[in-house]
Image: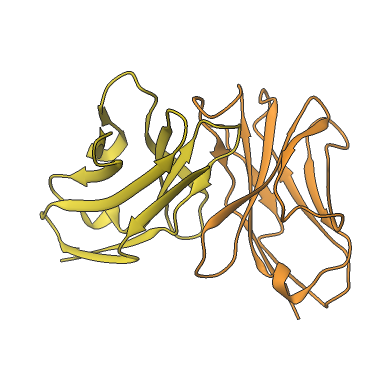
Chain colours: A orange, B yellow
Amino acid sequence: EPEVTQTPSHQVTQMGQEVILRCVPISNHLYFYWYRQILGQKVEFLVSFYNNEISEKSEIFDDQFSVERPDGSNFTLKIRSTKLEDSAMYFCASGVERSPNNEQFFGPGTRLTVL
Amino acid sequence: AQSVTQLGSHVSVSEGALVLLRCNYSSSVPPYLFWYVQYPNQGLQLLLKYTSAATLVKGINGFEAEFKKSETSFHLTKPSAHMSDAAEYFCAVGGATNKLIFGTGTLLAVQP
């Protein structure tokens, strides 16, 4: 069964460093999302992406964040200069059609630890 | 604005007992409601969704949920818990935009 994959599963970085989290969505999907979950808190929406552009972003998704679909298969989230408060589990999701009435398929997540 | 509240961050049941996980929502537009499950080291998997077609929604693994507009609730139930049901369960709401808004999750433990 097709699934969303994410790499790495765990990333440790120093504050101020750049990180790139990678996702491979399901191949025929057109809509892509990033969510994050700080330990003990809610899963929060970060950004949605369609047709090579951001369709919606949350207040969390500031200038430090960017997304890209560089090669038609990968979908990346870049944090330019990490902060301690960026430590969280980051989930990638994809969907074949527009949500919310259609399912978003989630990856297993990347745990980001900022020291 | 939309939000969900999940009552009980940890729920423990005995194997064979009824599972009841609570979710209340707030939405200024007709909501779409979802339950996702997360097993250890795996992604979020859709259990079931409500999209206004029927108020009682049946999902995978014997779970079901009932949409009650008067109570703004979408509680998840399963008549008989199995050890394999131990996981974290997330309620989510959508409808205003493309994004999902999640609750804080409920960790279900199943005792033998």
Residue sitting at x 79%, y 24% = A51
Figure quadrant of the C terminus of chain B? bottom left
Res B89 visible: no
Residue most toward the bottom? Answer: A115
Q: Vertical placement of B26 versus B30: above or below?
A: below
Res A40 visible: yes
Q: Vertical placement of B2 versus A8: above or below?
A: above
Q: Where is residue B23? Give x, y as percent.
A: 32, 49
Q: Where is residue B98? Give x, y as percent.
A: 61, 32
Left or right of A112 in this view: A102: left
Instruction: Tally the marks.
Output: 0
Name the quadrant containing residue A13.
bottom right
Name the quadrant containing residue B106.
bottom left
Residue sitting at x 86%, y 58% = A64
Q: Where is residue B49? Give x, y as percent.
A: 38, 32
User: Looking at the image, which is closer to me, B44 or A48?
Assistant: A48
Q: Where is residue B52? Give x, y as percent.
A: 35, 22
Left or right of B49 in this view: A78: right
Residue sitting at x 88%, y 71% = A17
Q: Vertical placement of B53 versus B57: above or below?
A: above
Residue sitting at x 88%, y 64% = A18
